[in-house]
Amino acid sequence: MSDSIEAYFTQLAHRAPDRLLRRTAGTIRIELEGPGEVDVWYVTIAGGRVEVSRERRDADTVIRTDRDFFARMARGEAKPLTGWLRNDLIAEGRFRFLMLLEQLFPAPPGARHPRALAGGRGEPR
Amino acid sequence: MKSNLVRVLDGNIFVVSDDSGDIEATVGNPSGFFDFDTRFLSLWRLTLDGDRLHALSMAERDHVTLRFFLVPGAPTHYVDAKSSVIRERSITGGLFEERLTVLNHDREPVDFTVRLDVASDFAPIRAIDQERTPPGRFYQRIEDGRLRLGYLRDRYQRETLVWSSEPARIDERGLTYTVRVAPKQGWTTTLRAQSLVLRPDGRDIREQLDRRPRRSAAERQQDLAVWLDRAPQLSCDWNALTEAYRRSLVDLASLRYSPLTLPDRSMPNAGLPWGATITGRDSILTSFEALPVASELADATLRMLGIDQGTVLDDFRDEEPGKILREFRYSELAAFEERPESPYYGSADTTPLYVILLDEYERWTSDSGLVLEAEQETRAALEWIDEYGDILGDGYVRYQRRNEQTGLRNQGWKDSPEAICYADGRLAGPPVATCELQGYAYDAKLRGARLAREIWGDPAYAERLEREAAALRERFDRDFWIADRGYYALALDGDGRQVDALASNMGHLLWSGIVPPERAEQVAHHLLGPRLFSGWGVRTLAEGQARYNPLGYHLGAVWPFDNALIAWGLRRYGLVEEAGRIAEALVDASRYFHGRLPEAFAGYPRDLTRYPVCYPTANSPAAMATGAIFLLLRALLGLEPSGEHLLMAPSVPPRFGRVELLDVPGRWGRIDVIGIGLAGPRA
């Protein structure tokens, strides 16, 4: 489990999602609760780039969740916003970074392009 | 559905009750104390010595405070009441506060038992008109003189805390006071109810976020005074217009709301009770309508919707990259993904409308800073039109839901399931291209081209957009025009067939400018003809179409915002007399609603009902209807920013007399506009 989260952050630092807005700038402190320990990551976004670090720094938003839920978000299976509404995730500080966090995670598995759907016409009338 | 409901509100926190101040929510009575898309009180019922109270009168000056004057017992033959009750309520600092006064008019001291029954169903707003069995667990606790009502589902927790300034006996179902009131004296207590959105450590999840404290009622009253003072001043010989203008300003002020994402700015929410949230279409169109009076709403709306712009393909949310959202909710249904509003992107008009608003906002304000900041979002929105909106690759914006369980079948502004139909009543098969969507796409491309050329410094992109717009205009006229009927098809269905119902949608085409000038009069002729024009406004669907129903939400009712856009479109084509007729009809209708245009009213012919019949479940106030009066004024006065100037070409029907709009703000500073409706032979 820890490997997959580490791999996610490595990948994030290596290649920022291209949908990230250029003028978004800020730092998110991510606290991941595991058995007996809390793992802390800092994700700094600036100029369309992402820097991942474990060194303490000021953050605009703090996100706290357990490792399992974070792993689900990292696979695109769970959303930060609905997680926050259900208390699967706690957010403090600037709310907009909770929304922007979505841009760091992949799309839900199996999503279709609208044109792919229209290929097979015929919704019941 | 009860119609005599009254409300106090502060953005997305509000109380809806009957005219005695009681809340007794049922499926047909959407009253309650609401916050964060959830009902926190569904019962709030006052009795005096076991008797219900009845309203003598009610004072509703604005949305900040509300005062009820009540007497015990049923209203029968007049009996001098020996006691009476005053309830005065407000939303203050985010709390629901009610000051309760019992007056003894007798010459003797009287012992009263004052009882307030209190309960909450913690229902999501979306579900208050349906029977629903909540999956979570309810609880009630009495602690330190407070009543705590709660709802828990997994870790999701909502609570309502109720307390009182005077000592009360508290049980799990309410508060009881036993008081002795001296002759000719009164007794007063102040009740407060607080909504709590809790996390497991007992804190409110919203309090851990950076945001301004909620303002007190006094601060909001002050703010309202400043808002009214800063708005352009209207005077008109026809008092109905002045009243509707003032009412709309007050309502618009009350609908302003600071989302968590944008805590320092205010955007309009869509309306009460169903739309008190972040929406795409309603916020954009309301902001567009309100540009002559409050351009800061557009600024907030554009920023907010830009932040939440779609970034990925997500079937459940009907999300695509670049798409502007439809609706954002924080309720239990959104939290557990029973509904997709987290946020939901199922509307095909919001994305081009976003570009249109940005351009229009800059033309009024000269705020090129926002246009530069929003360049990436705007390009993504324009890209969406071709890449994801054009589902069949034939150059038309269409929609087809990928979320077939809880997504919307229709994704234009007429989004009820049967709204898009043929004249004979058959429904259009997906993916549907409604006509107004093509107008918006055309307009968005032209406006995007202007921004690209003048502000982003990208003439090549501007030329490309203009070429695409010109091609769309030509294609559209060929494919949508029904030559033998002289109007535009409502839509093309998934097989490219013309959906031939006669509907109001084509009025928006005039606003967009996609109609060739030689066709405009024919279009106007239909819009103001007896089948579409009821006498109070343009119906959504024409009389004589198989699905026409005067009470059909999108199938016959008259929508003020729809009419305002149509009037503005007619004006754009120089059809001033037609624009004036619509403006006059709507202002006339507003007189029956104390100056407040409802979201929609019934499409009955005017000579049948003599007065406009309110649509039964409409939002009130509804933001887009609230904004309609500003756009109608703009149409009457012919206001159009041009370079650094505001062009004006008033053309006012005689009934209005003199119309003066003073201190219209914009890039020109402030300017006065005066129009005079002259009696005399009509053209």
Image (cartoon, rainbow, N blue to C red):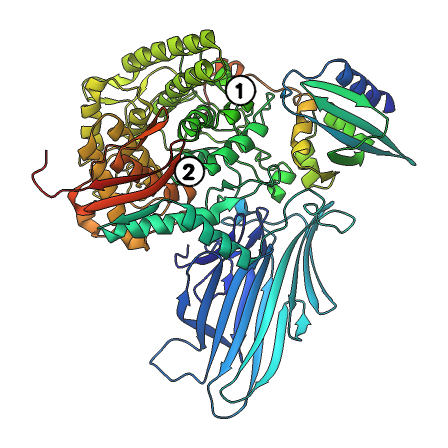
Tell me residue B363's x, y (percent): 40, 27
Looking at the picture, how far across and down is residue B120, in whole percent? 60, 58
Q: Which residue is mark 2?
A: B286
Residue for point 85% across, 30% down:
A56
Decide: marks 2, 1 in contact (CB < 8 A)?
Answer: no
Total marks drawn?
2
Determine the chain carrying the residue at label 1.
Answer: B
Residue B355 horizontal/vertical position (percent) = 45, 24
Quarter location, residue B543: top left
**In the image shown, does B446 or B478 lie closer to the viewer?**
B446
Against B381, residue B293 (above or below) is below
Q: Callout 2: helix, strand or loop?
A: helix
Side of B99 relative to B665 (left or right):
right
Which picture quadrant has residue B475?
A: top left
User: The C terminus of chain B lies in which quarter of the figure?
Assistant: top left
Residue B529 image label = none
The answer to whether residue B655 is left or right of residue A92 is: left
Which residue is depicted at the point 60% across and 24% down? B314
Seen from the viewer's position, the closer of residues B644 and B401 is B644
- Judged by depth in the image, the label closer to the viewer, 2 or 1, is 1
Question: Is residue B158 placed above or below A40 in the rendered structure?
Answer: below
Quarter that holds the N terminus of chain B: bottom left
Task: Name the residue that disc number 1 marks.
Answer: B375
Per the model, the C-alpha gap separating discs 2 and 1 is 22 Å
Task: Please give the chain letter of the residue carrying mark 2.
Answer: B
- Tag 1, which secondary structure? helix
Q: Are marks 2 and 1 on the same chain?
A: yes
